[in-house]
Image (cartoon, rainbow, N blue to C red):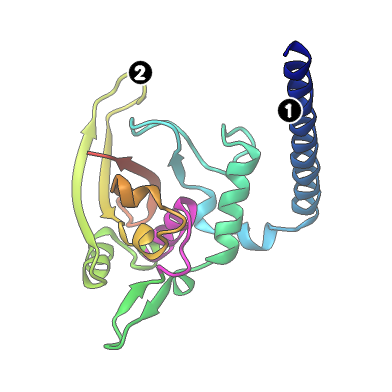
Amino acid sequence: MLKETIYVAKGMLYIFGILFAFIFVCASILLVIVQQRDFSFQLHGHPFETIEIDFKSGYPNLGGPVFDPESEFGFFEKLGYRLALSKFPDAQSCIVTDEQNTPKMNWPDIRSAKQLEVCLFNVASAQNNRENALAWFQTAGMYASVYDVLYKRDAYFETDTLRRYLVIRAPEMAEAHPNIFFIDRVLPPRRNVYLDFDIDGRVKYIQQFVSML
């Protein structure tokens, strides 16, 4: 019995070793391919470079610009946003029209949270201010609302900070791709994206929040 157990354990270690080696080789190949590709034409001058993205907290002052060398975003986080920008470089690439020629979000092609953030940013930025962006998303049949929040100076904010939010609820992405977001069919979440506009009408902050409540 002991010999059989040792034999099974060795077999499992052998299988896990092969699997680990395979994953390591694939990751190495991906790294080489990505490093050899030039993404500068997709990023240079794109306003998405400078916005802050809250990637780890519900508190609205953590995170920062994705592509800043000092940011806490890891390699694969940055890669995800680079690929999303490559696929959706502008507002037009994120939009389709229905039978009535009404602009809609291109849900069949938006397949990840990062692609959602990039497209909502592109479309909202193209409207030039928060009120126009609100009207666009509502016309497109999406749930959208606006509200302002004043955060007082504390450990997170050096000064009193006003957030001018446009909040967009986006269940359509999961509905368009049930095989990718299959868990959403069991526990339907509320996927909200917060866009903060400055006084000049430019988006300067994004936070995506998913709640099961």
Which numbered dot is residue 12?
Answer: 1
Along the line of sight, which residue is nearer the eye, 160 or 87? 87
Is any atom of residue 196 visible in this view? no
Query: In the rendered image, which quarter is residue 70 located in?
Result: top right
Mark 1 residue crowding within 10 angstroms, few (<14) / some (14–19) / many (20+): few
Residue 23 lies in the magenta-colored region: no
Quarter of the image that includes the C terminus:
top left
Distance from Cα at disc 2 to Cα at disc 1: 50 Å
Residue under pointer 2: 155
Query: In the rendered image, which quarter is residue 6 located in?
Result: top right
Query: x%, y% of residue 158?
Result: 36, 24
Query: x%, y% of residue 153?
Result: 28, 23
State the extent of the magenta-drawn residues as a range. Answer: 107-123
Which numbered dot is residue 55?
Answer: none
- Mark 2 or mark 1: name the one nearer the start of the chain: 1
Up/down of 81 relative to 28, above or below: below
Seen at 34% across and 65% down, the residue is 128
Seen at 37% across and 45% down, the residue is 208
Along the line of sight, which residue is nearer the eye, 16 or 145? 16
Seen at 32% across and 83% down, the residue is 98
SS under mark 2: loop
Up/down of 100 relative to 140, above or below: below
Quarter of the image that includes the N terminus:
top right
**Dot 2 amino acid type:** Ala
Seen at 32% across and 78% down, the residue is 103
SS under mark 1: helix
Our reading of the magenta stretch's main secondary structure is helix
Is any atom of residue 25 visible in this view? yes
